[in-house]
Image: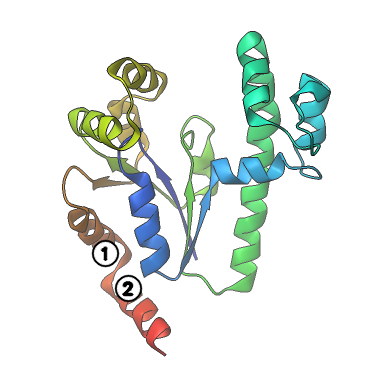
């Protein structure tokens, strides 16, 4: 089983690529932000440490972490952001490592794809076989964010400023999937990287 990381800037089309991978190949897709949310649930590895750090006022009526309250608490004291990251990011990486081991032990998947905005910054390369960068030109990404999310230019500028530059992404990427136009072009690049036999294997599996 090959472990492949998927990263890229906002608006590059990572979600569409991940949906295609999940539907087309014998694989599992794990999104790091969803894993973090799971770990922040009561009983999860991050729940008690976050309450100890931020206080019970971030809980909702059901005793779960209210993400809006947590965000407000962090924004009120930005020094807390790094402390929250120091709790959540190592826990997510530990979870991902355990899931990789679990899937390898099962031996039923050809690929495990891990998507995270901070794959490079958080040093995920050490647990990956390959790192894929989903690339789209800045103007294309801006247009997508305006159309699909209704973001203002100011909000887009702020997000882009907070993310790695294209040069940084390219420096760390093993594979670049270009996603400027029709998705079929990105899918063809993926098929070339993963092999047509893998696509055929999954199609035969579903038809059987």
> Furthest residue to the front?
61
Residue contact at pointers 2 and 1, CB within 8 angstroms: yes
Report if residue 93 is visible in the image.
no
Q: Is residue 54 above or below residue 39?
A: above
Residue drawn at point x = 60 percent, y = 65 percent: 103
- Residue 173 falls in which quadrant of the image? top left
The count of marks equals: 2
Instruction: Identify which residue, 8 or 55, lies in the foreground.
Output: 55
Report if residue 136 is visible in the image.
yes
Residue 147 falls left or right of residue 56:
left
- Residue 204 falls in which quadrant of the image? bottom left
By what rule are the colours in the image chosen? rainbow
Question: What x and y, as percent, mark residue 200?
Answer: 31, 79
Q: Residues within 10 Å of mark 1 (few under 14, many from 20)?
A: some
Secondary structure of the residue carrying numbered label 2: helix
Question: Spatial distance from mark 2 to mark 1, Cα to Cα?
Answer: 7 Å
Q: In this view, does 68 lie above or below 173?
A: above
Which residue carries the number 2 mark?
Answer: 199
Residue 59 falls left or right of residue 175:
right
Which residue carries the number 1 mark?
Answer: 191
Residue drawn at point x = 39 percent, y = 54 percent: 18
Picture disc at residue 160: none
The C terminus is located in which quarter? bottom left
Question: What x and y, as percent, mark residue 102?
Answer: 65, 63
Question: What x and y, as percent, mark residue 7?
Answer: 40, 41
Residue drawn at point x = 23 percent, y = 38 percent: 136
Residue drawn at point x = 51 percent, y = 70 percent: 109
Question: What x and y, as percent, mark residue 153?
Answer: 28, 18
Secondary structure of the residue carrying numbered label 1: helix
Circle nearer the N terminus (2, 1): 1
- Residue 147 falls in which quadrant of the image? top left
């Amino acid at each position: 089983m090959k472990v492949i990381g998927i990263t890229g800037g906002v608006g590059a089309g990572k979600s569409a690529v991940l949906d295609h991978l999940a539907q087309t190949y014998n694989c599992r897709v794990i999104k790091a932000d969803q894993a973090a949310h799971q770990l922040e649930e009561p009983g999860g590895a991050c729940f008690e440490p976050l309450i100890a750090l931020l206080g019970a006022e971030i809980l909702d009526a059901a005793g779960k972490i209210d993400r809006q309250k947590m965000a407000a608490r962090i924004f009120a004291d930005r020094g807390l952001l790094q402390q929250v990251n120091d709790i959540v990011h190592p826990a997510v990486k530990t979870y991902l490592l355990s899931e990789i081991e679990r899937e390898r032990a099962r031996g039923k998947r050809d690929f495990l794809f891990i998507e995270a905005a901070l794959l490079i910054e958080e040093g995920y390369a050490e647990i990956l076989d390959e790192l894929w960068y989903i690339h789209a030109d800045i103007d294309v990404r801006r247009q997508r964010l305006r159309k699909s999310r209704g973001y203002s230019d100011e909000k887009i500028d702020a997000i882009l400023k907070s993310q790695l530059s294209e040069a940084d992404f390219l420096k760390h990427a093993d594979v670049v999937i270009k996603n400027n136009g029709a998705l079929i072009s990105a899918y063809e690049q993926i098929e070339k990287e993963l092999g047509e036999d893998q696509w055929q294997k999954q199609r035969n599996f579903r038809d059987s």
